[in-house]
Amino acid sequence: MYAPANCRRMLIVASILIAGIAAVDWWATHYISLGFLYLFPIIILGGFLSRTQIVGIALLCAVLQEAFSNLPESEAVIRLVFSSVGFVGTGLFISEMVRNRRIVLRHSEELEDAERQLRSLVESSPAAILTIDSDGNVLLANAAAQQLLSPGAAPLQGQSIKSYLPALQTVLKTQPARSFRTTLQCTGQRTDGEVFLAGVWFSTYKTLSGPRLAAIIVDLSEDLRNREDLSLDHLLKNSRILMSTVAHEIRNLSGAVLVVHKNLSRIKELETNEDFRALGGLIQSLERISALELGSTPAQNGEVVELTSVLDELRILIETTYHESEIRVEWATQEQLPLVWADRYGLVQVFLNLAKNSQRAMMSTQTKLLRIAAREENGKVIIRFEDTGTGVISSENLFRPFQRGAKSSGIGLYVSRAIMRSFGGDLTFEPRSEGSCFAVVLPLYVAAEEAVNA
């Protein structure tokens, strides 16, 4: 009735009713008033007119009632006031009721639209989404949840989550009164008995029927396998690099000892000495071991690396820790850095080692600033880590392993430079009057490709 499309028709009907009631009231028997019938057109008009218009129509109806009522004139003013109040109140009541009804309908339509969009989002999501009641039973589950937990089997609705993800039921049982949001990794099991690593983002909330849990679940098994394979690959690669550099140092020492042994062999008294001959055999064996080829070429160890993304990753890894240590990090990166030839994982490890060294060096200084600058210079890309730390007392043996006074094992810079040189880069120290500066030198991808093809 109060639909906007019916407005014109209902206004005409109300106008005819007002005119008809006035005519009947004028023609009716004396002392009988039909003015109460004006309530019907006011009820009709209340759903379409503004408040000012309703008040005007109500007063008009009150005047018409009094004009054609033929009731005693001594009470005309009282009747006019009461009828005006009644008509105005009725019209405004209807107007407010219709307005509230329209607001509710509009709100309901918005909710329905939001629910449709949410339902479409949940159903089309590649991640498994489900809700669980306080007893651990699945209330709702999208298609991805069905495929993840129970492919080709009975629907998840109504089943206990305990047989699939017992950790979620434990959350509901142990924390029934708390509402919180968090993440966890746990072991899940499919209907066919296959076990997988589940990453779960979940939140609990309260309803009239008790606590509920909503969860988003993804299968991390493949990521775990890839991560472990990658870790093993880089562990073997870095071990090979380390062993090659250590073998190089041993080879130098063995060569020097062998020279001394040859010089001593000229002494006649030692020619017949069995221990001296055994020592010579041991030196030669040690030299052969140190000469084993454990390394590989830069072309085999490297790949094309987009350096900006590596620096962004480093920023995520160190800035929180530096902020907690009250150390300011200043970035000065050239726009549009060229592609470089490096090992991405090894490069991140070198960057982290340099950043942690700077952090340790600045723990006791008043000014705490690490400046990381990256720019192209002379056909290479150089990334400098410059800090305001305690500095380096003696740089002659800086890249030699097991230095006295070094933190941890004392091989961090030694291994870092070995990693850089494994794919054609380098790590150097640039003296400063205050603090220290290490430069990571990376070959351009174009230059590395030309060197391989040459």
Image (cartoon, grey):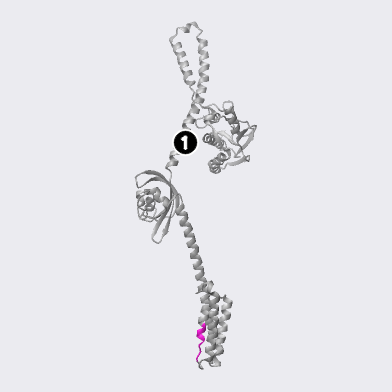
Q: Secondary structure at mark 1?
A: helix
Can residue 402 be found in the magenta stretch?
Answer: no
Say which amino acid is labelled 1.
Leu
Residue at image position (45%, 11%) is: 277
Q: Quadrant of residue 205?
A: bottom left
Above or below: residue 447 compared with residue 78: above
Residue of label 1: 230
Residue 140: percent from left, percent from top: 40, 55
Residue at image position (48%, 28%) is: 240
Looking at the image, residue 25 sits to the left or right of residue 377; the answer is left
Q: Is residue 309 visible?
A: yes
Task: Return the residue found at the far top.
Answer: 268
Residue 147: percent from left, percent from top: 40, 49
The residue nearer to you, when weighing 6 against 320, is 6
The residue nearer to you, when weighing 281 against 365, is 281
Q: Quadrant of residue 441?
A: top right
For the image shown, how many numbered marks are present on the structure? 1
Residue 172: percent from left, percent from top: 38, 53
The residue nearer to you, when weighing 436 against 190, is 190
Residue at image position (63%, 36%) is: 375
Residue interval drawn in magenta: 32-38
Q: Is residue 444 visible?
A: no
Residue 357: percent from left, percent from top: 55, 35
In the picture, the quarter occupied by the C terminus is: top right
Q: Residues within 10 Å of mark 1 (few under 14, many from 20)?
A: few
Above or below: residue 36 compared with residue 274: below
Looking at the image, residue 73 sits to the left or right of residue 218; the answer is right
